[in-house]
Image: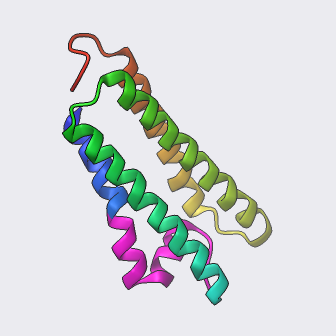
Amino acid sequence: MRITLALVGSALIAVGPVTLLAPDTAASAFGIPATTAETKAYLLASAMRDVALGSFLLAALARRASRRLLAGYVLALAFVAAADATNVAAYTARHGGASALVVHVGGVVVLAALAWSLRRATGSPSI
């Protein structure tokens, strides 16, 4: 379970440098193009948010946080992914191209299942 959570945290942290180095690719992967300076600013803010969320998850793992705390945090990450999916759904409803929406919704499902698994796990209270 620790490895899975570390992979989630690392993937979130990786979003920052990828977005800085290839903003158009990152925007396309997110599902909403960033063609103006204003939209790129939102893209970068979203990427830095993901870096902060991933850093917190890795820090919580390093501090041997309880399963209950990690479950709550991962559930909060699922809510962030749901908000991103909602934004992408609103965009694709007007402009088409729902492939990125599948990735966001998949993330919600995986994160919610991971949170549930952490919450239901028996044994040691920490990972």
The location of residue 42, given as percent across then percent down, is 60, 73
Q: Quadrant of residue 92?
A: bottom right
The location of residue 63, given as percent across then percent down, is 21, 36
Farthest front residue? 63
Relative to 15, is 127 on the left or the right? left
Question: What residue sits 68% from the left and 59% below the top?
Answer: 87
Q: Quadrant of the C terminus?
A: top left
Question: What residue sits 54% from the left and 49% below the top?
Answer: 81
Does the segment drawn in magenta span residue 21? yes
Q: Quadrant of residue 12?
A: bottom left
Please tell me whether residue 2 is drawn above or below residue 16 in the rendered image. Answer: above
Question: What residue sits 58% from the left and 79% below the top?
Answer: 41
The span picked out in magenta is: 14-35
**Main SS category, magenta section:** helix
Q: Quadrant of the N terminus?
A: top left
Q: Nearer the viewer, residue 40 or 116?
A: 40
The location of residue 54, given as percent across then percent down, is 36, 52
Please tell me whether residue 75 is drawn above or below residue 23 in the rendered image. Answer: above
Relative to 31, is 13 on the left or the right? left
Please tell me whether residue 101 is drawn above or below residue 119 in the rendered image. Answer: below
Does the segment drawn in magenta span residue 23? yes
Q: Nearer the viewer, residue 56 or 6?
A: 56
Relative to 22, is 76 on the left or the right? right
Please tell me whether residue 17 is drawn above or below residue 2 in the rendered image. Answer: below
